Amino acid sequence: MAEPIADQPAERQALAARMHNLRGSAGLLGAQNVYRLASQLETELRANAAAADAGASMAALCQALQALAVAAEPALAAHRSAESHHQSAAHAAGPVQPQDMERLATLLRQQDLAALEHFKHIAPALLNLWGATVVDPLQHAIEGFDFAAALTLLNAARNSLD
């Protein structure tokens, strides 16, 4: 159950600002019901609507957020599982060898499809070295056959080690 809507103008404006942020996040995610209800509540708060009206909108928004959480759980569980797999593989990998990185760079420079298999072989060690924020875009570029972009990413990451 939602908490009662504040009667103080400053508190209502602060809550309206939070609804504005929630509305923006919901819009980015495509959560249309949450977007619509957050917009409605924001409007009511800014228009100084009766607490009962705003309270009803808040309750509807809470229900929509709960429904979104339930609907998102399978995707979130899959993401957690994938992250766990990445972390396990990275933890089990030994250190990346300089010649392995150089071979990947050469394969990328030559636009050689063997770069795909070589990357898969050394990816756990690269994850261990650089983390997912560096390795994921590199993997995306390689798997998308954008070897020039992958080479740029690889060189930038290698230079950060110097």
Image: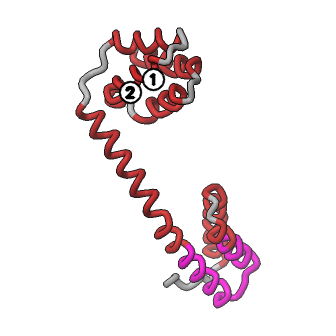
x 26%, y 28%: residue = 93
Left or right position of 61 against 91: right
The residue range painted magenta reads 37-64
The residue furthest front is: 113
Q: Is residue 40 magenta?
A: yes
The answer to which quarter of the image holds residue 125 is: top left
Amino acid type, callout 1:
Leu
Pick the residue in front: 12 or 161: 161
| Quarter of the figure with the C terminus | top left
State if disc 1 and disc 2 touch (CB < 8 Å).
yes
Which residue is disc 1 drawn over?
116
x 34%, y 24%: residue = 121
Q: Residues within 10 Å of mark 1 (few under 14, many from 20)?
A: some
Q: How is the image coloured?
A: secondary structure
x 47%, y 30%: residue = 139
Amino acid type, callout 2:
Lys
Pick the residue in front: 62 or 121: 121
The answer to which quarter of the image holds residue 126 is: top left
Q: Is residue 35 above or below residue 76?
A: below
Left or right position of 115 against 48: left
Pick the residue in front: 53 or 63: 63
Determine the secondary structure under disc 1: helix
Query: Does residue 17 appear anywhere in the picture?
Result: no
Q: Position of residue 75 (x, y in %)?
A: 46, 57
Left or right position of 132 against 5: left
x 35%, y 14%: residue = 100
Which residue is disc 2 drawn over?
120
Determine the secondary structure under disc 2: helix
